[in-house]
Image (cartoon, rainbow, N blue to C red):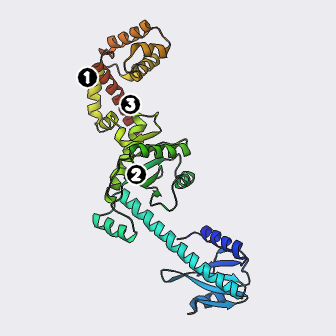
Amino acid sequence: MISNQIIQTSIDDLRGITRINLCVLDVNGSLAASTFEPSEISKDILSAFAGSPAESQSFQGCHFFKIYDEGQLSYILLTKGTGDDAYMIGKVAVKQLEGLIIAYKQRFDRNNFIQNLLLDNLLLVDINNQAKKLHINQDTLRVVYLVETQTAEDVIAMESVRGAFAPDSQDVITAVDEKNVVVVKELTDQDDYETLDKTARLLAGMLSTVRVSYGTIVSQLKDVSKSYKEARLALEVGEIFYPEKIVVAYHTLGLGRLIYQLPLSLCKMFMVEVLGENLPSTFDEETLSTIEKFFENNLNVSETARQLFVHRNTLVYRLEKLEKTTGLDIRVFENALVFQIALMVARYMEYLETKEL
């Protein structure tokens, strides 16, 4: 249903242009919006007008008009004055408000449809029928973005995201839970993942304290839920394995997505086989920072030593000490790969343990 605030804004605009005062009341006589005080209008008069077959009448210095919603009387409009100007402005206001009611109802229906589509609550036949009714193209390229919010029902985040997209576009901004704003964006044939990434960074830049994820491009409306699930997975996997990333795309998750599928029992077995009792949690801060920087520099000893501000021999000593502890010489690519996977598995296990608490 259209809000009283929207009605008030609409009649304020008309009052500013025409200088004719207007008032809108619901069928029970309760005030919805007004530019003047209609205290002299009795509820008996309103009730009599509502029950009459007349579409407009003049009482007590005002023109009365009926506003309908799908054939049902929803509001009564008053324009102050009995002249032709007040009558004509009243007719214009009725058309404008009835148009707004239809537009906001369609928007609400569209929003509900997209929410159910994202959650896989619709059969294929329902998707086809409702899409036709709401004039939604089923064969358009789309992608789903998830914008992480800081608090439940973050209205500011929702409105900021809405402001990033043209109001006349076919993009849908909605929410299906308390933590994320969902953007179902229509794409063109020229859009690629580089374009998608730029849009994601734009959203992240507007709300600097959030993360943004997105799924893969889909060509059918029925597959929007697939892109949504991928975006959700990207947000969760990114939190575990790539916490430094503000934007996380499903197609770039790599090893993180594979490890996320593993059961905890298999993770524990792998860690015992690879590292024994020397889990990453037992390493000191110096060892962990050395390993991280070594991997960042693609196993380059000289560059890692330079960035850590240590002598090359000091770095070699640390790496040899790690090899004695774990049995893995991470200067060798195969060992480095195993160790990198072990670090990611350890992060995943910590995440699972925290989630169970």
Say which residue appears at 58% left-offset and 84% top-offset. 66
**Residue 288 got which mark?**
none
Estimate the spatial distance between the alpha carbons at disc 3 and disc 1, rounded to whole Å: 17 Å
- Asked if the residue at tag 3 contacts the one at tag 2, i.e. Cβ–Cβ closer than 8 Å, the answer is no
As shown in the figure, which amino acid type bears the numbered disc 1? Glu
Determine which residue is flagged by label 2: 144
Q: Extreme top residue here? A: 313
Please tell me whether residue 322 is drawn above or below residue 112 in the rendered image: above
Q: In which quarter of the image is residue 123?
A: bottom left
Spot occupied by residue 178 in the image (x, y as percentages of width and height): 48, 52
Q: Earlier in the sequence, mark 2 or mark 1?
A: 2
Spot occupied by residue 47 in the image (x, y as percentages of width and height): 61, 88
Q: Nearer the viewer, residue 156 or 81?
A: 81
Say which residue appears at 39% left-offset and 68% top-offset. 135
As shown in the figure, which amino acid type bears the numbered disc 3? Arg
Determine which residue is flagged by label 3: 347
Q: Which of marks 2 and 3 is nearer the N terminus?
A: 2
Q: Which of marks 2 and 1 is in front?
A: 2
Please tell me whether residue 224 is drawn above or below residue 346 in the rendered image: below
Drawn side of residue 97 relative to residue 110, left or right: right
- Asked if the residue at tag 1 contacts the one at tag 2, i.e. Cβ–Cβ closer than 8 Å, the answer is no
Determine which residue is flagged by label 1: 273
SS under mark 3: helix
Q: Which of 355 and 190 is in front in this view?
A: 190
Say which residue appears at 39% left-offset and 65% top-offset. 136
Please tell me whether residue 85 is drawn above or below residue 201 in the rendered image: below
Say which residue appears at 37% left-offset and 56% top-offset. 118
As shown in the figure, which amino acid type bears the numbered disc 2? Val
SS under mark 1: helix
